[in-house]
Amino acid sequence: MKIIVSPSTIPSFNLAAEEYLFRKDEAYFFLYRNDPSVIIGSNQAVVNEVDQDWCIEHEIRIIRRISGGGAVYHDRGNLNYSLLYDKTDAPLSGRFLEPVVAVLQALSIPAEVGKRKDLWLDGRKISGTASHVSLQRELHHGTLLYDSDLGALQKALNAGNRRLIRKATASVPSPVTNIRPYLAEKGAEAPDCNTFLDKFAAALLQHYCEREVMPLPAESLEEIEKLRREKYTQRSWNYRL
């Protein structure tokens, strides 16, 4: 399992990088943080899920991913993780969360897997997940709330319970919380999100018995940037429903 940390916080770049890695034939655990943005599921309608006026006012980009599931809010206070590997015998099971739970528990965070392949801490959700499966490959990813702006999250994802496009997949709201205040309340070390990413990556290395975090391959950057420009920055993709 190659562990890669993105050099960028640009949402369109990181979603393009995920798709690039999904197309390869190696196993990757990809970590990244994004600037404030709303990431919607492949089969969702922006008008159903997002307060577009509020997002425009606060310069929050809305971008569609290739996986299903519901809309999520990203900012630099959360850590996004992606597991990408060849197809297994149970591609839609929740087994992909096992290393994430193991690493969180090693960091004194007793996360538990919920019914919807999400992660919960003290009765509140800290990570929703989504998946995309092809004939040969699996992509599973999640948004891990560490020190995110929960007020902005609520406002960005408040579309007024509209269902203007009924064929689109609807998000399932849940009570959410951040990990950082939980650690502080327990008297544990509660570093900023940059340091938490480093600790998470270090624990991943130990879990997988790997030696070092890898950069994105230098030869991939041009292709990722091309995919970013031609797909993830295009209104025809992001607002297609």
Image (cartoon, rainbow, N blue to C red):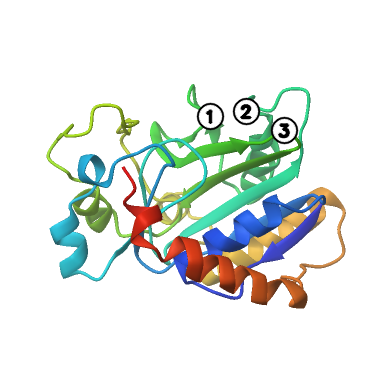
Work out whether residue 94 or residue 162 is closer to the camera in this orientation and state it: 162
> Which residue is located at x 40 percent, y 37 percent?
43
Q: For the residue marked with disc 1, what is the amino acid? A: Lys
Residue 69 position in % (x across, y down): 44, 35
Q: Secondary structure at mark 1?
A: loop
Q: Is residue 88 above or below residue 29?
A: above
Which residue is denoted by mark 1 in the rendering?
A: 117
Calculate the distance from the C-alpha at mark 3 to the C-alpha at mark 2: 19 Å
Q: Is residue 106 above or below residue 232?
A: above
The answer to whether one can see residue 38 in this image is: no
Name the mark nearer the viewer: 3 or 1: 3
Q: Locate residue 65 relative to residue 75 in the image: left or right.
A: right
Q: Locate residue 5 relative to residue 209 in the image: left or right.
A: left
Q: Residues within 10 Å of mark 3 (few under 14, many from 20)?
A: few
Name the mark nearer the viewer: 3 or 2: 3
Which residue is denoted by mark 3 in the rendering?
A: 135
Q: Residues within 10 Å of mark 1 (few under 14, many from 20)?
A: some
The answer to whether one can see residue 198 in this image is: yes
Work out whether residue 123 or residue 99 is closer to the camera in this orientation and state it: 99
Q: Secondary structure at mark 2?
A: loop
Which residue is denoted by mark 2 in the rendering?
A: 94
Q: Locate residue 183 relative to residue 16 in the image: left or right.
A: left
Q: Earlier in the sequence, mark 3 or mark 1?
A: 1
Calculate the distance from the C-alpha at mark 3 to the C-alpha at mark 1: 22 Å
In contact (CB < 8 Å): disc 2 and disc 1? yes
Q: Earlier in the sequence, mark 2 or mark 1?
A: 2
